[in-house]
Image (tube, rainbow, N blue to C red):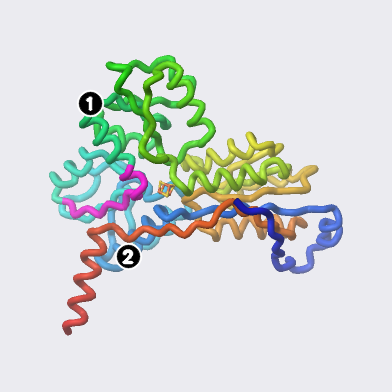
Amino acid sequence: MGGMTATSRPSPAATPSGDAARRAGKRVLLAAPRGYCAGVDRAVIAVEKALEQYGAPIYVRHEIVHNKYVVKTLENKGAIFVDRTAEVPEGSIVMFSAHGVAPVVHEEAAERRLATIDATCPLVTKVHKEAVRFASEDYDILLIGHDGHEEVIGTSGEAPDHITLVDGPEDVANVEVRDESKVVWLSQTTLSVDETMETVDALKEKFPQLIAPPSDDICYATQNRQIAVKQMGADADLVIVVGSKNSSNSVRLVEVALGAGASASHLVDAADEIDEAWLDGVSTVGVTSGASVPEVLVEGVLEWLSQRGFEDVEIVKAAEESITFSLPKELRRDLRAEAAALSEK
Ligand code: SF4
């Protein structure tokens, strides 16, 4: 846990109302950590390295991460995003996104003779392995997550006969299990921590012998970004969350900001989606970004705010992050082989 430290952005060129605005106490609270997590960083670098190593096109099944800007940037470099494995021409290279895929997708890829690179976040893979293990022990697995989310589809596919999706506390009444003494809950990695615990409490009430996953399924990045927003929420009149609408962890940040006491909170892909009217009567703006958001988009929002008198920026620091993940093994193998071939020349 940390506190607030003051930093200052360079003053915008001759903002007429700049000094008056500062006197009026306008400030920005900037969440830390925010933006890219280790799994997203790895997935994006994996696409870039694959394009360098094998040349375009590299097919990517689903958005590599849920961010429009990232997807567009990689498309411009030669990545082709597809919804289904069947859209990838036989014999091509396909990468699986950070959200993970069900085993059946690996089988489909093998049938089409595709070379695969699996960029599933290791923290999602951890949940897949938990699902496989509990299914092999014949548990009923209650997977807390959002219906239709790619990660949930992938995890459910590991043990479809054992997994029941629970989409929030209101879903608990519908849940049925085969044996109440053998039930475990798992979860999507990018949920609201508080709402998930509400769901778990409701499940425990219904199934007192329910057991918990061996370690947190909601990942460190999701948790840290929520803690930072909670710390700033009560002090902010408005919290701007940078992230795409289909980014689960970004959408959760808006909910957490409102729950923490922010008067308003909005999700924007970039500065050009901010509505000037949101600033009416606002003196403190909180800013954060989801785990799939590159920092350049946050910088654009800070610049936009700075031009409207919000030049003073205080960092609200909730945690230090130093986690990194190595590239997908298929890519590491080929990069190593090429490095070895070059050194022999
Ligand atoms: S949000 Fe968490 S689970 Fe998802 S890619 Fe990032 S680190 Fe992995």
Question: Which element carries disc 1, helix, strand or loop?
Answer: loop
- Given the image, on which type of amino acid does mark 1 rest? Asp
Question: Which quadrant holds residue 258?
Answer: top right
From the image, tell me which residue sits under label 2: 49
- In the image, the segment drawn in magenta is 114-126
| x, y percent for residue 92 | 20, 55
From the image, tell me which residue sits under label 1: 138
Residue at screen point 67% across, 46% down: 232
Residue at screen point 54% across, 33% down: 194
Would you place residue 139 above or below residue 107 in this image? above
Residue at screen point 63% across, 34% down: 259
- Given the image, on which type of amino acid does mark 2 rest? Lys
Task: Please tell me whether residue 118 belongs to the stretch shown in magenta.
Answer: yes
**Residue 278 visible (yes or no):** no
Residue at screen point 43% across, 19% down: 172
| x, y percent for residue 169 | 48, 23
| x, y percent for residue 18 | 81, 61
Q: CA distance from mark 2 to mark 1?
A: 41 Å
Q: Residues within 10 Å of mark 1 (few under 14, many from 20)?
A: some
Number of the label disc, if any, that sits on residue 296 = none
- Give the foreground label among 2 and 1: 1
